[in-house]
Image: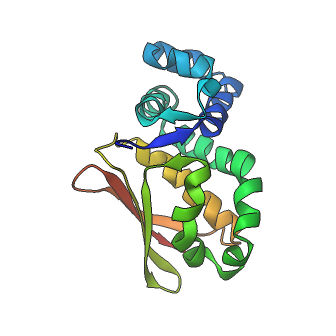
């Protein structure tokens, strides 16, 4: 696989959120290329990353960065929470650091072709990195903010926060410095 892919279930969650918020028409008007994806996210079980990035860019441009983060958070909670949380019950009890460390093997239900890693700095902080096989849109990093928020919530650390976020120098991913 030369690129990363995202599950139709994740795309469907984003499209539903856009529709429910009344923002879908503005997003498709901003980038008509995403029309086919929006009309039928289930046309394939896995969708090309380029389409997700275009959808994310159009959403950020028309609805704002906070909306992109919120829809990713909601997708994790509503669509994948029931799958991921039971798989990670012991990790969740151990806290965010343990969950960040195991996330690479778990996110395969929503994304494949990306590499996730965790570098602890202390018992309550560290660097979470998402690496892609190619340069990605800066807006791609907004979705991971929602995922991180979901991690803090399910581990009982709602005051957890992202201290810093930076796109890798190569443009092929992001590092998030997190603390809780």
Q: Position of residue 121 (x, y in %)?
A: 41, 82
The residue shown at (77%, 65%) is: 86
How many dots with numbers? 0
Q: Residue 15 occupies which quadrant of the picture?
A: top right
Q: Residue furthest front?
A: 1
The residue shown at (57%, 56%) is: 107
Q: Quadrant of the C terminus?
A: bottom right
Looking at the picture, does residue 37 appear above or below residue 114?
above
Q: Left of 66 or right of it: where is 132?
A: left
Q: Quadrant of the N terminus?
A: top left
Q: Please state which of residues 177 and 106 is positioned toward the viewer in this rendering.
A: 106
Q: Residue furthest bottom?
A: 123
Q: Position of residue 131 (x, y in %)?
A: 37, 56
Q: Position of residue 170 (x, y in %)?
A: 22, 53
Q: How is colour applied across the structure in the image?
A: rainbow
The residue shown at (58%, 15%) is: 25
């Amino acid at each position: 696989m030369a690129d990363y892919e995202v599950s139709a279930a994740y795309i469907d969650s984003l499209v539903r959120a856009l529709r429910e918020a009344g923002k879908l028409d503005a997003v498709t008007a901003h980038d008509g290329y995403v029309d086919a994806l929006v009309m039928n996210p289930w046309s394939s079980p896995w969708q090309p990353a380029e389409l997700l990035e275009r959808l994310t860019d159009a959403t950020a441009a028309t609805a704002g960065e906070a909306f992109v983060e919120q829809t990713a958070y909601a997708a994790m909670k509503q669509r994948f929470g029931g799958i991921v949380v039971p798989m990670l019950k012991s990790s969740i009890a151990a806290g965010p650091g343990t969950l960040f460390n195991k996330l690479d093997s778990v996110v395969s239900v929503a994304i494949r072709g990306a590499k996730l890693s965790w570098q602890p700095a202390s018992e309550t902080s560290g660097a979470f990195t998402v690496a892609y096989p190619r340069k990605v849109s800066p807006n791609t990093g907004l979705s991971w903010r929602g995922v991180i928020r979901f991690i803090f919530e399910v581990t009982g650390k709602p005051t957890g926060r992202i201290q810093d976020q930076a796109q890798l120098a190569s443009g092929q991913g992001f590092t998030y410095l997190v603390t809780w």
